[in-house]
Image: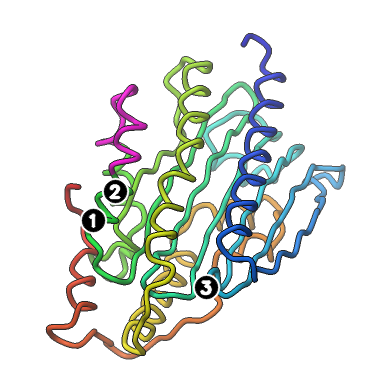
């Protein structure tokens, strides 16, 4: 694939195809789910047309709230913001998919994933990954999720590196070593110098999102839960909010690049709790689950 414009077009089409596949699967698993689709446009820093995206917001009995969004933005960017990026010049092109799914049942984990391609001046790079935030200690699910990504990364020898990056990044550092969930893989500013090889890797990883997550949903979606399960989930939702607002680079990037605020903040859970020095009850499965929010081998 020699033509970079062809590569960018294919990347954008691929993430839109994935958005459609995820949408169909969510509607199949949760026939009650309500979908609001919003096609939006933006202006670049100079006021010229700067692309846009498709926001899909979900709300249902199984999926309490979720956002599965794609975008393709381009044009002039704030020179101060341009300096903070990895490329050259004050023009940028970026396309990708970003999703967060928050189920209503505490026995079904939250998931986040994104895959993106960015071109700024003379440089290109990729970013993305997927991570799981469970609320109940189904350890076999955690091993399964990591196993899918370990296998997907094997041809590239990148699993250990990407897992470590994920463990370190999705972490509420202001609370010490306390991960948002149980990790997965994460990579940013990825560029080995072989654009076509990097492109192929990211495409193959994006294909693994659905088999990494939806089998877990199907396995757990009919499990009953207790008020204590829900209380624990809501407090961990609070930690999710803390991370997304304080530390998430994707949130900051979207806001600073004149992205659509509602589409960016769709990542937040519909409900959450905060409590002074709240901890789960001693000896409970939730105390056990709390112990999984630290880096470990899977």
Q: CA distance from mark 1 to mark 3?
A: 25 Å
Tell me if mark 2 has few (under 14), some (14-19) or many (20+) residues whose alpha carbon lies within 10 angstroms of its own.
some
Q: Which residue is mark 1?
A: 140
Q: Earlier in the sequence, mark 2 or mark 3?
A: 2
Magenta-colored span: 147-161
Tell me if mark 3 has few (under 14), some (14-19) or many (20+) residues whose alpha carbon lies within 10 angstroms of its own.
many
Instruction: Find numbered disc 1 in the image and state the secondary structure of the residue it sits on.
Output: helix
Which residue lies at the image location 65% right of the left edge and 21% below the top edge? 7
Is 225 or 134 nearer to us in this picture? 225
The reply, left or right, for residue 8 in relation to residue 111 is right
Q: Position of residue 29 (x, y in %)?
A: 55, 61
Q: Seen from this angle, which residue lies furthest right? A: 48
Which residue lies at the image location 50% right of the left edge and 37% below the top edge? 206
Q: Which residue is mark 2?
A: 144
Q: Seen from this angle, which residue lies furthest left? A: 283
| Residue 269: mark in rendering | 3
Which residue lies at the image location 48% right of the left edge and 41% below the top edge? 128
Instruction: Find numbered disc 2 in the image and state the secondary structure of the residue it sits on.
Output: helix
Instruction: Find numbered disc 3 in the image and state the secondary structure of the residue it sits on.
Output: loop
Is 149 within the magenta?
A: yes
Residue 161, quarter of the rendered image: top left
Is 145 or 237 nearer to us in this picture? 145
Q: CA distance from mark 2 to mark 3?
A: 24 Å
């Amino acid at each position: 694939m020699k033509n970079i414009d062809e590569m960018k077009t294919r990347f954008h089409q691929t993430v839109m195809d994935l958005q459609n596949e995820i949408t169909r699967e969510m509607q199949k698993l949760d026939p009650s789910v309500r979908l609001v689709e919003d096609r939006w446009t933006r202006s670049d820093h100079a006021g010229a047309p700067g692309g846009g995206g498709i926001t899909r917001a979900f709300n249902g009995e199984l999926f309490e709230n979720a956002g599965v969004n794609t975008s393709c933005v381009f044009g002039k960017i704030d020179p101060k913001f341009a300096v903070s990026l990895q490329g050259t010049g004050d023009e940028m092109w970026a396309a990708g998919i970003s999703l967060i799914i928050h189920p209503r049942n505490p026995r079904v984990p939250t998931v986040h994933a994104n895959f993106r391609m960015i071109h700024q001046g003379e440089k290109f790079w990729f970013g993305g990954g997927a991570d799981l935030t469970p609320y109940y200690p189904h350890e076999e699910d955690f091993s399964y999720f990591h196993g899918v990504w370990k296998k997907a990364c094997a041809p590239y020898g990148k699993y250990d590196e990407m897992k470590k990056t994920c463990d370190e990044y999705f972490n509420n550092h202001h609370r010490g070593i306390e991960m948002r969930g149980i990790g997965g893989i994460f990579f940013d500013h990825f560029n080995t110098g072989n654009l076509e090889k990097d492109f192929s890797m990211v495409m193959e990883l994006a294909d693994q999102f659905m088999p990494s997550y939806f089998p877990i949903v199907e396995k757990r979606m009919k499990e009953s839960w207790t008020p204590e399960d829900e209380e624990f989930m809501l407090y961990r939702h609070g930690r999710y909010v803390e991370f997304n607002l304080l530390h998430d680079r994707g949130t900051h990037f979207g806001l600073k690049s004149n992205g659509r605020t509602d589409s960016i903040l769709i990542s937040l859970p519909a409900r959450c709790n905060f409590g002074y020095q709240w901890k789960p009850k001693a000896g409970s499965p939730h105390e056990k689950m709390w112990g999984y929010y630290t880096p470990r081998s899977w």
